[in-house]
Structure formats: C-alpha cells, structure tokens
Image (cartoon, helix red, strand yellow):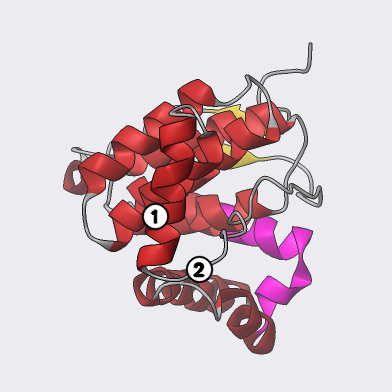
C-alpha cells in the first residue's frame, strides 16, 4: 500500500482570525511534482452545442443514471448556470459511480475541487485535491500551483508562497513572466488575478 499522500505532509492549522471560517489545514510540499496525471483535464465533450449537448447528456443519464462522465458534464452545465447545489449533487453522484481508485474518480475529485474553490469553499477544495493526490500515488504536476492558488486565496500567504516555490522548482515556467502568462492564459479571470498576486509576491521575495 502506498504511503498516504506520498509527498504531502499534514501539519497544524494556521490560527488566522481573519480566515477562521474557512482556514484550510496546512500541507507542505516535498520533492518535485513532475508526474503526469491524465485525470486532471477536462473531459472531451460529446458532439453538438447548446441544447444538443444538453440533450446528449440527459439521454446518456436516462440510459444509465450512474454514467460518471455524463454526470460530470452536467455538473459543469449547472456550474455555468450558477447552480452550485445541483452541480455538487452531480459531482457527488459521479464520485459514487466511479470505480474506486480509477482515473475517473480522481477526475471528479479534481473537478469538484475547482468548483468548490471558485465558490470560496477552500476546505472542501483541499479535501478533494488531497484525495486526488493520494489516489494518484505520486507527485502530480498540477498539485503545487493548485495548492499555491488555494492557500493564497484563503489568506495563508506563507504557505501559498512555499507551494509557489515548489511549482517553480517543478516547472521553471512558473518563475518568469512569459511562462506565467502561458500557464494561466486559459484560467478564469479571478483565478488568474489571485495567482498573479501570488506570483508577484514570490518574485518580490526571491529577487
């Protein structure tokens, strides 16, 4: 059995009154996060746009309500419509439907983590990403920059900059302006803005 989290250390809670309502437990990096993870990507969409896409998703779920892929797609449709609760319901159903330990289970956890992060639920995002890393069993490339973003957004700048340094150590692109722009060009504006603040703080500290 692989060592739990293989490269992540669970430390103590930060006592920060400003973020007492949702102050994630502190995880610290170890090693370089250079392992591929094909579960940390968005699923290919079925043919069609708009209503055709929704019809295809609903038809797939009518045939099999435990179709994890269709559930994830519908969860993203709900997210785009601003309906977090229905999205969460479908993500939960997808986790339950996915084969334990599979790429699909990791994908759902990764996706749900981003959804809850975007809504400021940092503890929930951390738990999902922790679990996804644990199931991966290695040091996936997405972990350091994702944890850097999460901790920065949660107001835990010291931990965030430790993770940002790990992202740079793992992928030097994170350490310069052109690389940062390339790595974040497809991110949502609020995600990119938060990561830009972390990048600027990291650069100021290292220069």
Q: How many marks?
A: 2
**Where's the N terminus, which quadrant?**
top right
Q: Closer to the N terminus: mark 1 or mark 2?
A: 2
Say which element carries label 2: loop
Residue at far top of view:
1
Let me know if residue 113 appears in the view.
no
For disc 1, the marked residue is 55
Instruction: Name the residue: 57% across, 26% down.
Output: 98
For disc 2, the marked residue is 48
Q: Which mark is residue 20?
A: none
Label 1 close to label 2 by CB (< 8 Å):
yes
Q: Residues within 10 Å of mark 2 (few under 14, many from 20)?
A: few
Q: Closest to the observer: 150 or 101?
A: 101
Q: Which residues are magenta?
A: 163-176
Residue 196 percent location from the top left of the image:
46, 77
Instruction: Name the residue: 42% across, 64% down.
Output: 52
Say which element carries label 1: helix
Instruction: Name the residue: 70% across, 65% down.
Output: 168
């Amino acid at each position: 059995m692989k060592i739990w989290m293989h490269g992540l250390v669970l430390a103590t809670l930060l006592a920060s009154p400003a973020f007492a309502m949702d102050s994630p437990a502190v995880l610290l990096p170890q090693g370089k996060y250079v392992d591929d993870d094909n579960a940390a990507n968005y699923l290919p969409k079925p043919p069609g746009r708009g209503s055709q896409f929704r019809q295809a998703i609903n038809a797939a779920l009518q045939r099999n309500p435990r179709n994890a892929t269709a559930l994830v797609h519908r969860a993203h449709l709900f997210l785009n419509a601003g309906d977090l609760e229905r999205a969460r319901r479908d993500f939960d159903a997808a986790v339950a439907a996915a084969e334990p330990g599979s790429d699909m289970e990791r994908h759902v956890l990764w996706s749900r983590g981003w959804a809850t992060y975007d809504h400021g639920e940092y503890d929930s995002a951390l738990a999902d990403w922790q679990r996804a890393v644990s199931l991966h069993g290695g040091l996936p490339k997405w972990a350091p920059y994702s944890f850097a973003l999460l901790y920065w957004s949660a107001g835990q700048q010291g931990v965030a900059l430790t993770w940002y340094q790990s992202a740079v150590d793992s992928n030097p692109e994170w350490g310069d302006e052109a690389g940062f722009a390339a790595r974040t060009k497809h991110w949502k504006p609020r995600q990119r803005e938060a990561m830009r603040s972390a990048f600027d703080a990291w650069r100021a500290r290292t220069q």
